[in-house]
Each structure stands twice: as C-alpha cells, then as structure tokens.
Image (cartoon, rainbow, N blue to C red):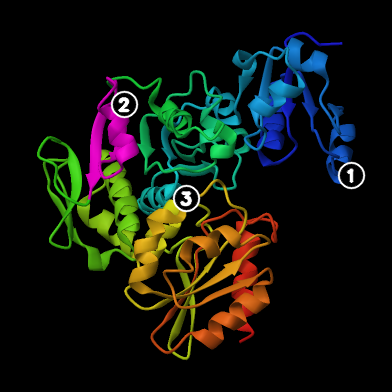
Amino acid sequence: MIKNNQIMILGTGLSGMGSLKLANKMGINVFISDSKKISSETKKHFYKNDIEFEENGHNNNKLTESKEVIISPGISFRNLKKLYPEINKKKFISEIEFASRYTDAYIIAVTGSNGKTTTANLIYHILKSNGLNVGLAGNVGVSFASSVCDYSYDYYIIEISSFQLDHIVDFKPDISIITNISPDHLDRYNQNFESYVESKFRIIQNQTANDLFIYNNNCDATTNILNKINIQPNCISISIDKNKENKKQIFLNEHKINSSINKEKFMISINNIPLKGIHNLQNSMAAISVAQVLKISNEKIKESLKTFKNIPHRLEHFLTIQKVKYINDSKATNINAAFYALDSFKEPIVWIVGGIDKGNNYQDLIPKVKNNVKAIICLGKDNNKIIDTFSKHTDLIVSTDDISEAVNSAYKISKPGDVVLLSPACASFDLFKNYEDRGNQFKDQVRKL
C-alpha cells in the first residue's frame, strides 16, 4: 500500500541514507529499497526508527505509484527500466535535486570528466581560508542531503557526477563549472559520447542571466556544444592561451596565470601553484575565477593557493626511493586522466596501467608512450588490449594481476631519475574495492620496498 505523498529511495549507500535523513527531518513519508542485501546495522536503524524498507529487489507498485523516487547515482535508470518497464523517468530525481529544495545557500556546482574533485576542494579551501561559512558535499564522499540536514551554510561547493545530473529537474547553481569533458562512463550512456556530453551540460539548464558558467576553452567537446546553443548564464572561460573573443577570461601567458574577470587584474606565476600539470593549472584557474567573483582579494587568493594540499590518489607524489619518484594517480580511471598524468612528467616513466576497460581507445596515448615511457606494467585480469596497443611503442611490457608483483617489477626496472607512475586509465573493480583501495595498496607495497 502506498502512503499519501510517499517518496521512495533507491539504494542504501551514502546518497540514499543521506536522502532518508533529510526526508525524515522534513516529515516526509519514506520507503527505502535496495536491490541487494541490506546490512544488519542499517536494518537495526530502520527498525528502531520505524522506517519501511525492502531488500534484494524493488517493489514494482512502489516504483510506479510513489510520488517521487530518489535514485542513487550508482543505479542505472536504463537498466532499471528494462526490469520495470512501467516506471516513469519524470518521477525520478537525484539526491542533489532533492537536497537543493531545502537550502538557500549560494551554490557553486562543479562537474567534468576529470579534475572536478580537485577543483571543488580548491574552491572550498580558498573560501574557507577567507572566513566564508562554506560546506563541501556531493560526489566528494559527503552526502549533500545529509549536510543540508545537519548544517546551515551560506555557501555550498557541490561536486556533481553525470549520473547525478541525469536526474535533476529544478536544480539551479549560482555558479556552474565544467572542468572538461572526455569519454568516460559510456557504458551508462549506451556507448554514446554525445549523450554523456548532454548529461554534463544539464548543469546549466536552469541557470539564468543572473548566474555564471565557467568552462574550459581548451576542451573541444565543451566548445563544440557552446558553438551550437544559446546559453543563459554569463560566461567565464579558462584557457592555456588568451582568447580574443572572450571578454571575461582567465588564461596562461608567459608562465603566469592572468585574469581579466575583475577591474583589478590578477596575475600569479605558475611556480606558485602547488599542483602539478597543465590540467591542474586549469583547475586552479576555475577556483581563482570563483574567488574573484566572490570578491576575495587577489593577495588572499594567492595565500590560499600556496597552502592547498593535493587530494590523495591524484598525481600524489608520496615517496622517493633511490631517487625514483613514486606517484599514486589511482583516480585516473579514464584515458584523458592518464593523458594528463603522462604529460605531467619529463622524466622517463615506468607506467602501471590497467583494470576494467570502459571502452577505452588507447590510441591518443601512443605519442606520450613513445615520448617518455620506458616500460609498461599492465595490472589487471585482462591486459590483452593494452599489450596489443603499446607493444610496438615501448621496449618492455610486464603483465600481472598482482599489485605486489607490479610494484616490485617497477622497482627493478626503474633507475635514479625515473618516475614510477600508477595511472591506470581503467576502473579498479577487477582487483580492488575501488580506486582508493587500489591507490592505498600501491602505496603500501611501495613502502615495503
């Protein structure tokens, strides 16, 4: 039986439980469902608080008759539709959509194929360092709904994935950012890159002329869309070179980041940016743009940039052994991220790559491999595609499904002045729980050397 105005929540992970918490606070009737077995601890919580739930599958009547269904980002609506053909997509919303209804905070939303976590954290660091009452939530491992339930922030920095954007309706950020767009998660988009791009651009769909959109002018997928559509928000472009057509932009010139966003010009040497790689300069530009728009002084922005510490598993230089740098870039789960990583080093690289291939086309990486990769160590259950692609372009390829063997092989191959780079270009689930587990196991094995 469906209770009046009852909403259904799919998934008992971070997103689902955060939505449940906020719904309970707002006095909303909730039914929560998981396609898998729910942990005993979670069920104890449900029984204690008289929360209606089910596990090991979803109730078709609840799916079709609930007022709304909050779908967790890990659940594919396309696959759900195959199992339950009667469901209506219009009733499905994301946790981001749901939580945004219950906060009046100024929202800065960040999406992109790569760099969104670093950008979101950097913006948060700059704002918090300068005394703003700011929260960080979303795809960074903090439920937006749970945060809205517990805190009253004036500003929110929200990292948003394409899966979360797929189910927004009225969500409207004051500032939206697309760091870049490259092929990723195409298994969720029927191998259609255009559908994935459209999903990312949903971040601006409700913005008006009073809002702001920050985009990467060096990203072809982004600029191709912008050349085809009329958009409502004001725009700021970030670029590694100056664009004569853009009035408000932040760009790289003679090893300095320059900004024409405010009347007071901003300039900082790239040597004062603690993050490595061109892509991180672009991430920094996006963060600087937000800070300038919010009227944080240039000097305070520069001070905050200097004190920012990189996020684990993202080009994380955590150890040097016998003059060999060990870099943990486990978060690089797609081709574009691995490209940025390989492009960040001039030294000879021993590259650890592999995992679950997400429809990767490795051809774009061949020039980088030919340029400065001295050896490739394939780490995965199926390494044939990587071996076939690169065997003609590097002197040595090792194949393994064991992280200890991968690290020990890298240690034996590397010489003083080299870089051992874990930048897998693939998902981690064949051998590890997630990319964090992969990165942590890599670091543990390096420490044992």
Work out whether residue 174 or residue 187 is closer to the camera in this orientation and state it: 187
Please name whichever residue, 35 or 358, is drawn nearer the observer in this view of the structure.
358
Disc 1 marks a residue whose amino acid type is: Ser
The N terminus - image quarter: top right
Label 2 to label 1: alpha-carbon separation: 45 Å
| Residue 21: in magenta span | no
Amino acid beneath label 3:
Asn
Mark 2 and mark 3 lie on one chain; the one further toward the N terminus is 2
Which residues, given as a range, are shown in magenta?
A: 213-239
| SS at mark 3 in the image | loop
The residue positioned 67% from the left and 77% from the top of the image is 404
Question: Quick check: 415 left or right of 246?
Answer: right
Residue 4 lies, in percent from the top left, at 77, 8
Q: Pointer 3: what residue?
A: 361
- Give the answer, above or below, for where 421 lies relative to 252: below
Q: Closest to the observer: 125 or 252?
A: 252
* Type of amino acid at the residue the image marks with label 2: Asp
Q: Quadrant of the C terminus?
A: bottom right
Q: Nearer the viewer, mark 2 or mark 3?
A: 3
The residue labelled by disc 2 is: 211
Label 1 near label 2: C-beta < 8 Å? Answer: no
Q: Which mark is residue 152?
A: none
Query: Which residue is denoted by mark 1 in the rendering?
Result: 40
